[in-house]
Image (cartoon, rainbow, N blue to C red):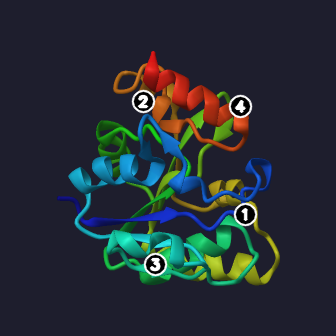
Amino acid sequence: MVSAACAILAGGRATRLGGMCKPLADVGGAPILDRQLEVLREVFDEIAIAASNAAPFAGYGLPVIPDAVDGAGPLGGLAAALAWCPQPRLFAVAGDMPFLSPAVIERLLAIDGRLVVPVVGGRPHPLHAVYARDLAATVRQRLAAGRRALRDLLDLPGAVAVDADDLRALDPELRCLVNVNTATDLQMARASVQS
């Protein structure tokens, strides 16, 4: 096991999906969260869920950490996760990503950096990234200043952008970065499992 912990950020409102709890959406006969945990438990000993409402996750036996600032979006969840993190580094992942890859996660963890973020076509994926625990104070400061865009963290010293080509050798279609934001996304994820 690695000297990193994992937090699944699951506090989103899912307005484009009618407010459903996205981690519990069924993909391929199992909730997304179950699919994630099957992969994450291969890599991490310590896993938590960052969400203001613990009730949907009561049966999972995992710590549920409330957002540092309610309604602050993913940055509020990340701040709470970094405050909880019992290891020097944290892998933070969105709760709506059904196709995680242990090989890709391990590759990101092997890269030295205070923030290690996959970038595809110029677009960073900060909710499939590795954060140094010592970024907690910086994240809290940004929250307090109202700077809530996670992509802005890439300007921090020690941030490493990982080019998509570096990950395609492990996940040729980069399915690990697929997330479910809309009904169409959910249909496509379900169809890709069935095909």
Q: Earlier in the sequence, mark 3 or mark 1?
A: 1
Q: Do callouts 3 and 1 mark residues in contact (Cβ within 8 Å)?
A: no
Q: Position of residue 127 (x, y in %)?
A: 56, 53
Q: Is 145 displayed left or right of 44 in the figure? A: right
Q: Which numbered disc, 1 or 2, marks the residue closer to the eye?
A: 1
Residue 191, picture quadrant: top right
Give the spatial CA distance, label 1 vs label 4: 17 Å
Give the spatial CA distance, label 2 vs label 4: 25 Å
Q: Which numbered disc, 3 or 2, marks the residue closer to the eye?
A: 3
Q: Position of residue 2 (x, y in %)?
A: 22, 59
Q: Residue at x 48, y 29 (%)?
A: 175
Residue furthest right as drawn: 146
Q: Earlier in the sequence, mark 3 or mark 2?
A: 3
Q: Earlier in the sequence, mark 4 or mark 3?
A: 3
Q: Residue at x 44, y 54 (%)?
A: 33
Task: Work out whether 21 lies above or below 119.
Answer: below
Q: Amino acid at mark 2?
A: Leu
Q: Do callouts 3 and 2 mark residues in contact (Cβ within 8 Å)?
A: no
Q: Is 17 displayed left or right of 110 in the figure? A: right
Return the mark for residue 143. none
Q: Amino acid at mark 4?
A: Thr
Return the mark for residue 184. 4
> What element does badge 2 sit on?
helix
Residue furthest front as drawn: 29
Residue identifier under label 3: 64
